[in-house]
Amino acid sequence: MAIKDIILHVGDGGSASCVNLAGAIAKAHGARITAFIEGGGAEGKAASIKDAAGGAEVESHNFDGRQDELVVHHSLHCDLIVISQAHGDLASELIVGSGRPVLIVPTAGKFSSLGKTVLIAWDGTREASRATHDALPLLAKDAKVKLYHINPHDIGKNPATEVATHLALHGIKAEADH
């Protein structure tokens, strides 16, 4: 699946990292950003998003106060949701309510790229499979990917080896361990 439609939540706290990372992803994938800008300074935040997106299409919705239902509603038809760790309650609602991949950007640090060093925790569940496949478009072809099988009760072949073989078919080299 290609990433063509990104939902970006911008509020107070951690928004600069989210804006820059969402912009970088949009540029790399030719994606559109639909930004939900919460609180004051909406015009400046919208301009920052357009700058970060570097020519990618940006649509913005400004509102005062939390509009969680609106954001969750729009997230049902997107490829990726980008939100700051500072908005943990809304991030949790999006994870549960949208069924879409949610990229939670830490509030500490700067993040200008994504998918170069990746850890996949594999426990053989449907959720692990979905998360791994949702991440495929974000993994760089030269990424350092480590797959850890985290269920010590399985007997026999390490299932992470099978997942690494599958990723190799997508051009992603992964090292399997348990």
Image (spheres, rainbow, N blue to C red):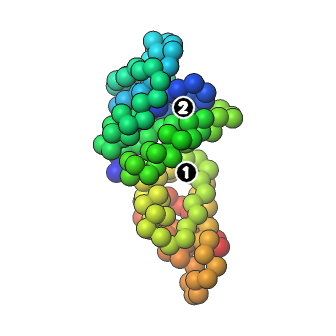
Label for residue 17?
A: none
Q: Would residue 91 be found to the left or right of residue 153 on screen?
A: left
Question: Which residue is most to the left?
Answer: 77
Does 118 appear above or below 77? below
Is any part of residue 171 visible from this angle? no
Mark 2 or mark 1, whichever is nearer to me:
2
The residue where tag 1 is placed is 142
Does 10 appear above or below 117? above
Q: Would residue 109 be found to the left or right of residue 128 on screen?
A: right
Does 19 appear above or below 170? above
The residue where tag 2 is placed is 18
Residue 5 horizontal/vertical position (percent) = 34, 37
Amino acid bearing label 2:
Cys
Going 37% across and 29% down the picture, which residue do you hit? 34
Residue 63 horizontal/vertical position (percent) = 41, 21
> Which of the 4 image quadrants contains residue 12?
top right
Closer to the camera in the image, 150 or 71: 71
Q: Would residue 81 be found to the left or right of residue 119 on screen?
A: left
Going 61% across and 61% down the picture, which residue do you hit? 146
Amino acid bearing label 1:
Asp
